[in-house]
Image (cartoon, helix red, strand yellow):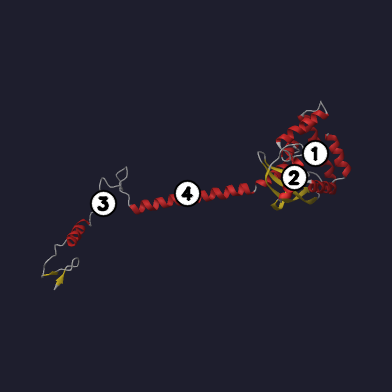
Amino acid sequence: MAFCKFCGRQLTEGEVCNCQNQQLNQFNNMNSGFNTQFEPNNQNYNAGDIPVEPNKKKTTNIMIISAGVLLAILFIIVFALILGNAYKKPFNKLIRGINKNNAELILEQLLTDDMMDDFMDEIEDMDKDESREDFFDDSEEAMEEMKEYLEDDYGKNVKFSVKFISKKDAKKREIKNIERLYNLEDYDVEIKNAYKVKIELRVKGREDDEDIKMNLYSVNIKGEGWKVMVDDEAIDDIRYDIEDIMDTSIYEDIIDDIF
Protein backbone atom coordinates (compact mmCIF):
# COMPACT_ATOMS: atom_id res chain seq x y z
CA MET A 1 0.00 0.00 0.00
CA ALA A 2 1.45 3.38 -1.00
CA PHE A 3 0.89 6.88 0.36
CA CYS A 4 1.78 10.35 -1.02
CA LYS A 5 4.89 11.64 0.76
CA PHE A 6 3.61 15.19 0.50
CA CYS A 7 -0.04 15.03 1.53
CA GLY A 8 -0.24 11.49 3.00
CA ARG A 9 -3.20 10.35 0.85
CA GLN A 10 -3.45 6.56 0.26
CA LEU A 11 -2.68 5.69 -3.36
CA THR A 12 -3.62 2.70 -5.51
CA GLU A 13 -0.90 0.73 -7.18
CA GLY A 14 0.88 2.90 -9.81
CA GLU A 15 -1.13 6.02 -8.95
CA VAL A 16 0.66 9.40 -8.76
CA CYS A 17 -0.83 11.95 -6.43
CA ASN A 18 -1.88 15.24 -8.05
CA CYS A 19 -1.74 17.36 -4.90
CA GLN A 20 -0.20 20.86 -5.10
CA ASN A 21 3.03 19.91 -3.36
CA GLN A 22 3.56 16.94 -5.66
CA GLN A 23 3.04 19.11 -8.76
CA LEU A 24 5.53 21.71 -7.47
CA ASN A 25 8.10 18.95 -6.92
CA GLN A 26 7.69 17.72 -10.49
CA PHE A 27 8.20 21.29 -11.82
CA ASN A 28 11.43 21.74 -9.87
CA ASN A 29 12.78 18.41 -11.14
CA MET A 30 12.16 19.50 -14.72
CA ASN A 31 14.23 22.68 -14.26
CA SER A 32 17.01 21.27 -12.11
CA GLY A 33 19.33 20.71 -15.10
CA PHE A 34 18.99 24.25 -16.44
CA ASN A 35 21.95 26.58 -15.56
CA THR A 36 20.54 30.08 -15.09
CA GLN A 37 23.99 31.73 -15.31
CA PHE A 38 23.84 31.39 -19.11
CA GLU A 39 20.63 33.34 -19.48
CA PRO A 40 21.24 36.63 -21.35
CA ASN A 41 19.49 38.68 -18.69
CA ASN A 42 21.17 36.95 -15.76
CA GLN A 43 23.16 39.30 -13.48
CA ASN A 44 26.16 36.95 -13.56
CA TYR A 45 26.80 37.84 -17.19
CA ASN A 46 29.66 40.30 -17.64
CA ALA A 47 30.19 42.92 -20.33
CA GLY A 48 32.06 40.52 -22.58
CA ASP A 49 29.30 37.88 -22.44
CA ILE A 50 31.68 35.57 -20.56
CA PRO A 51 29.91 33.87 -17.67
CA VAL A 52 31.61 34.22 -14.28
CA GLU A 53 30.87 31.69 -11.62
CA PRO A 54 29.59 33.28 -8.40
CA ASN A 55 32.12 31.51 -6.17
CA LYS A 56 35.03 32.80 -8.31
CA LYS A 57 33.71 36.36 -8.08
CA LYS A 58 33.48 35.99 -4.33
CA THR A 59 37.08 34.69 -4.13
CA THR A 60 38.34 37.63 -6.24
CA ASN A 61 36.57 40.13 -4.00
CA ILE A 62 38.05 38.55 -0.89
CA MET A 63 41.56 38.71 -2.41
CA ILE A 64 41.15 42.40 -3.28
CA ILE A 65 39.82 43.26 0.16
CA SER A 66 42.59 41.27 1.87
CA ALA A 67 45.27 43.02 -0.18
CA GLY A 68 43.75 46.39 0.73
CA VAL A 69 43.73 45.55 4.43
CA LEU A 70 47.38 44.39 4.33
CA LEU A 71 48.39 47.55 2.47
CA ALA A 72 46.61 49.70 5.06
CA ILE A 73 48.38 47.87 7.89
CA LEU A 74 51.74 48.39 6.14
CA PHE A 75 51.09 52.14 5.81
CA ILE A 76 50.10 52.36 9.47
CA ILE A 77 53.28 50.55 10.59
CA VAL A 78 55.56 52.74 8.44
CA PHE A 79 53.77 55.91 9.52
CA ALA A 80 53.99 54.89 13.17
CA LEU A 81 57.72 54.22 12.86
CA ILE A 82 58.29 57.62 11.27
CA LEU A 83 56.27 59.43 13.93
CA GLY A 84 57.76 57.33 16.70
CA ASN A 85 61.28 58.50 15.79
CA ALA A 86 60.38 62.12 15.06
CA TYR A 87 61.81 63.21 18.41
CA LYS A 88 65.28 62.11 17.22
CA LYS A 89 65.36 64.36 14.15
CA PRO A 90 66.53 67.59 15.82
CA PHE A 91 69.33 65.71 17.61
CA ASN A 92 70.53 64.13 14.38
CA LYS A 93 70.41 67.48 12.58
CA LEU A 94 72.26 69.09 15.47
CA ILE A 95 75.07 66.55 15.16
CA ARG A 96 75.13 66.98 11.40
CA GLY A 97 75.47 70.72 11.86
CA ILE A 98 78.38 70.25 14.29
CA ASN A 99 80.21 67.87 11.98
CA LYS A 100 79.70 70.11 8.94
CA ASN A 101 80.37 73.37 10.83
CA ASN A 102 76.90 74.56 9.88
CA ALA A 103 76.00 77.07 12.60
CA GLU A 104 72.63 77.96 11.07
CA LEU A 105 71.50 74.33 11.02
CA ILE A 106 72.51 74.03 14.69
CA LEU A 107 70.55 77.09 15.76
CA GLU A 108 67.48 75.95 13.82
CA GLN A 109 67.30 72.87 16.07
CA LEU A 110 67.41 75.02 19.21
CA LEU A 111 65.40 78.15 18.41
CA THR A 112 61.94 78.85 17.09
CA ASP A 113 61.60 81.08 14.04
CA ASP A 114 60.75 84.11 16.20
CA MET A 115 63.71 83.42 18.47
CA MET A 116 66.04 83.12 15.48
CA ASP A 117 64.85 86.45 14.03
CA ASP A 118 65.24 88.25 17.35
CA PHE A 119 68.67 86.70 17.90
CA MET A 120 69.85 87.93 14.51
CA ASP A 121 68.48 91.40 15.27
CA GLU A 122 70.44 91.44 18.52
CA ILE A 123 73.61 90.44 16.71
CA GLU A 124 73.20 93.31 14.25
CA ASP A 125 72.47 95.73 17.11
CA MET A 126 75.71 94.70 18.80
CA ASP A 127 77.69 95.41 15.66
CA LYS A 128 76.12 97.40 12.83
CA ASP A 129 78.69 96.01 10.43
CA GLU A 130 77.88 92.42 11.36
CA SER A 131 75.35 90.85 8.99
CA ARG A 132 73.60 87.51 9.37
CA GLU A 133 76.02 85.97 6.92
CA ASP A 134 79.02 87.43 8.75
CA PHE A 135 77.81 85.97 12.03
CA PHE A 136 77.45 82.48 10.60
CA ASP A 137 80.84 82.74 8.90
CA ASP A 138 82.45 83.73 12.21
CA SER A 139 80.63 80.91 14.01
CA GLU A 140 81.79 78.30 11.53
CA GLU A 141 85.37 79.49 11.75
CA ALA A 142 85.16 79.25 15.54
CA MET A 143 83.76 75.71 15.30
CA GLU A 144 86.65 74.73 13.08
CA GLU A 145 89.03 76.25 15.62
CA MET A 146 87.36 74.23 18.37
CA LYS A 147 87.94 71.00 16.43
CA GLU A 148 91.58 71.89 16.02
CA TYR A 149 91.89 72.12 19.80
CA LEU A 150 90.15 68.75 20.16
CA GLU A 151 92.55 67.15 17.69
CA ASP A 152 95.34 67.60 20.23
CA ASP A 153 93.59 65.05 22.46
CA TYR A 154 91.63 62.88 20.02
CA GLY A 155 93.67 63.01 16.83
CA LYS A 156 92.72 64.12 13.34
CA ASN A 157 89.22 64.07 11.82
CA VAL A 158 87.29 64.68 15.02
CA LYS A 159 83.65 63.72 14.56
CA PHE A 160 80.62 63.76 16.82
CA SER A 161 77.82 61.19 16.96
CA VAL A 162 74.81 60.60 19.15
CA LYS A 163 73.33 57.43 20.57
CA PHE A 164 69.85 57.39 22.07
CA ILE A 165 69.82 55.52 25.36
CA SER A 166 66.30 56.14 26.63
CA LYS A 167 63.35 58.49 26.51
CA LYS A 168 60.39 59.11 28.76
CA ASP A 169 57.49 61.50 28.79
CA ALA A 170 58.45 64.80 30.34
CA LYS A 171 56.54 65.62 33.49
CA LYS A 172 54.07 68.51 33.52
CA ARG A 173 56.39 70.38 35.87
CA GLU A 174 59.31 69.95 33.48
CA ILE A 175 57.25 71.14 30.51
CA LYS A 176 56.12 74.23 32.41
CA ASN A 177 59.71 75.02 33.38
CA ILE A 178 60.83 74.77 29.75
CA GLU A 179 57.95 76.95 28.58
CA ARG A 180 58.76 79.48 31.29
CA LEU A 181 62.42 79.56 30.27
CA TYR A 182 61.63 80.18 26.61
CA ASN A 183 58.75 82.55 27.18
CA LEU A 184 60.76 85.08 29.19
CA GLU A 185 60.71 87.31 26.12
CA ASP A 186 56.98 86.76 25.48
CA TYR A 187 57.50 84.25 22.67
CA ASP A 188 54.34 82.37 23.65
CA VAL A 189 55.89 78.94 23.09
CA GLU A 190 53.30 76.19 23.45
CA ILE A 191 54.65 72.67 23.84
CA LYS A 192 52.37 69.95 22.48
CA ASN A 193 54.37 67.08 23.97
CA ALA A 194 57.90 66.52 25.18
CA TYR A 195 60.35 63.76 26.00
CA LYS A 196 63.23 63.76 28.40
CA VAL A 197 65.91 62.04 26.36
CA LYS A 198 69.08 60.47 27.66
CA ILE A 199 71.76 60.49 24.98
CA GLU A 200 75.36 59.45 24.67
CA LEU A 201 77.44 62.02 22.81
CA ARG A 202 80.61 60.56 21.32
CA VAL A 203 83.67 62.60 20.38
CA LYS A 204 85.93 60.49 18.19
CA GLY A 205 89.21 61.12 16.41
CA ARG A 206 91.79 58.83 14.84
CA GLU A 207 93.62 58.33 18.12
CA ASP A 208 91.02 58.45 20.88
CA ASP A 209 87.35 58.89 21.69
CA GLU A 210 85.15 59.76 24.63
CA ASP A 211 81.50 59.25 25.50
CA ILE A 212 79.49 61.80 27.42
CA LYS A 213 76.01 61.02 28.73
CA MET A 214 73.55 63.86 29.14
CA ASN A 215 69.83 64.46 29.59
CA LEU A 216 68.14 66.85 27.18
CA TYR A 217 64.60 67.47 26.00
CA SER A 218 63.01 66.89 22.65
CA VAL A 219 59.89 69.04 22.47
CA ASN A 220 57.18 69.32 19.86
CA ILE A 221 56.28 73.01 19.66
CA LYS A 222 52.98 74.03 18.17
CA GLY A 223 53.59 75.47 14.71
CA GLU A 224 57.33 74.72 14.83
CA GLY A 225 57.86 70.98 15.09
CA TRP A 226 60.49 69.19 17.14
CA LYS A 227 63.32 71.11 18.81
CA VAL A 228 66.13 70.28 21.19
CA MET A 229 65.55 72.26 24.36
CA VAL A 230 67.14 72.55 27.74
CA ASP A 231 66.19 73.62 31.22
CA ASP A 232 68.40 75.20 33.86
CA GLU A 233 69.64 71.83 35.10
CA ALA A 234 70.55 70.67 31.59
CA ILE A 235 72.46 73.88 30.93
CA ASP A 236 74.60 73.29 34.02
CA ASP A 237 75.20 69.67 32.99
CA ILE A 238 76.27 70.70 29.50
CA ARG A 239 78.71 73.24 30.91
CA TYR A 240 80.34 70.57 33.08
CA ASP A 241 80.39 68.09 30.18
CA ILE A 242 82.16 70.57 27.92
CA GLU A 243 84.76 71.16 30.61
CA ASP A 244 85.45 67.41 30.57
CA ILE A 245 86.55 67.49 26.94
CA MET A 246 87.90 71.02 26.61
CA ASP A 247 89.68 73.55 28.80
CA THR A 248 87.28 76.23 30.01
CA SER A 249 89.41 79.10 28.76
CA ILE A 250 89.43 77.63 25.26
CA TYR A 251 85.68 77.53 24.71
CA GLU A 252 85.30 80.92 26.40
CA ASP A 253 87.81 82.36 23.89
CA ILE A 254 85.88 80.74 21.07
CA ILE A 255 82.60 82.26 22.25
CA ASP A 256 84.32 85.65 22.51
CA ASP A 257 85.52 85.27 18.92
CA ILE A 258 81.96 84.66 17.72
CA PHE A 259 80.45 87.63 19.52
Image position, residue 129 (x, y; %): 81, 26
Frontmost residue, 150 versus 228: 228
Q: Which quadrant holds residue 159?
A: top right
Image position, residue 40 (x, y; %): 25, 45
In the displayed structure image, the side of residue 75 where residue 115 appears, left or right? right
Extreme residue toward the bottom, this view: 1
Extreme residue toward the right, this view: 249
First-in-chain label (1 vs 3): 3
Quadrant of the snapshot with the N terminus: bottom left
Marks 2 and 1, how far apart at CA: 27 Å
Return the residue at label 1: 143
Image position, residue 39 (x, y; %): 25, 48
First-in-chain label (4 vs 3): 3
**Number of the label disc, if any, that sits on residue 178:** 2
**Is there a contact, CB below 8 Å, between mark 2 and mark 4?**
no
Return the residue at label 4: 68
Q: Secondary structure at mark 1?
A: helix
Marks 1 and 3, how far apart at CA: 84 Å
Q: Secondary structure at mark 3?
A: helix
Marks 4 and 1, how far apart at CA: 52 Å
Q: Which quadrant holds residue 187?
A: top right
Amino acid tagged 1: Met
Q: Is residue 155 above or below residue 135?
A: below
First-in-chain label (2 vs 1): 1
Say which residue appears at 42% left-offset and 52% top-offset. 62
